[in-house]
Image (cartoon, helix red, strand yellow):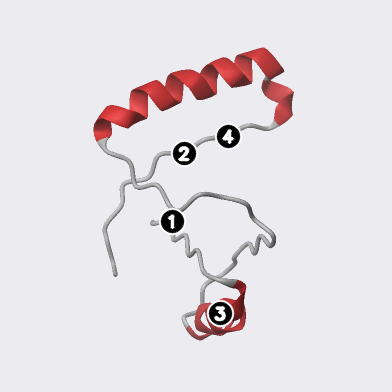
């Protein structure tokens, strides 16, 4: 099983939804008005420091805040 994340300009949202339907994707989440700074495919040396900082943030705010983080192996498609 693989997780697919597609980040596109809102101009292409309808195209992505249509493609998901055509490919029988069983579900998807559409998040509008997202703020960010590019896409991060991280080198291995970045993972542990980021994990430590995220863990510290979760510990400071409490687990009920709903902070989750996932590391997924990635393959460059395009």
Q: Check disc 2 and report the residue beneath it.
A: 70
Q: Judging from the image, what secondary structure is the residue with disc 1 in?
A: loop
Q: Judging from the image, what secondary structure is the residue with disc 3 in?
A: helix
**CA–CA distance in space, label 3 to label 4:** 27 Å
10 Å neighbourhood of mark 4: few (<14), some, or many (≥20)? few
Residue shown at the point (48%, 65%) measured from the top left: 6
Q: Check disc 4 and report the residue beneath it.
A: 68
Question: Mark 3 or mark 1: which comes first in sequence?
Answer: 1
Q: Judging from the image, what secondary structure is the residue with disc 4 in?
A: loop
Q: Check disc 1 and report the residue beneath it.
A: 3
46, above or below 33, in the image? above
In this image, 53 relative to 61: left or right? left
**CA–CA distance in space, label 3 to label 1:** 20 Å
26, above or below 19, in the image? above
Residue that extends furthest to the front in the rendered view of this protein: 37
Question: Mark 2 or mark 1: which comes first in sequence?
Answer: 1
Q: Judging from the image, what secondary structure is the residue with disc 2 in?
A: loop
Question: Mark 3 or mark 2: which comes first in sequence?
Answer: 3
**CA–CA distance in space, label 4 to label 2:** 7 Å
Quadrant containing the C terminus is bottom left
Q: Label 2 near label 3: C-beta < 8 Å?
A: no
Residue shown at the point (50%, 63%) measured from the top left: 7
Q: Residue 72 location in percent, x, y?
A: 37, 45
Quadrant containing the N terminus is bottom left
Q: Label 2 near label 4: C-beta < 8 Å?
A: yes
Q: Label 1 near label 2: C-beta < 8 Å?
A: yes
Q: Label 4 near label 3: C-beta < 8 Å?
A: no
Q: Residue 59 location in percent, x, y?
A: 62, 14
Q: Check disc 3 and report the residue beneath it.
A: 12
Residue shown at the point (70%, 18%) measured from the top left: 61
Query: Residue 34 or 74: which is nearer the viewer?
Result: 34
């Amino acid at each position: 099983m693989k997780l697919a994340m597609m980040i596109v300009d809102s101009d292409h949202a309808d195209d992505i939804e249509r493609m998901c339907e055509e490919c029988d994707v069983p579900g998807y989440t559409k998040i509008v008005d997202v703020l960010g700074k590019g896409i991060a495919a991280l080198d291995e040396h970045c993972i542990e420091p980021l994990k430590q900082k995220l863990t510290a943030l979760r510990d400071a705010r409490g687990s009920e805040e709903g902070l989750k983080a996932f590391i997924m192996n990635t393959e460059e498609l395009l």
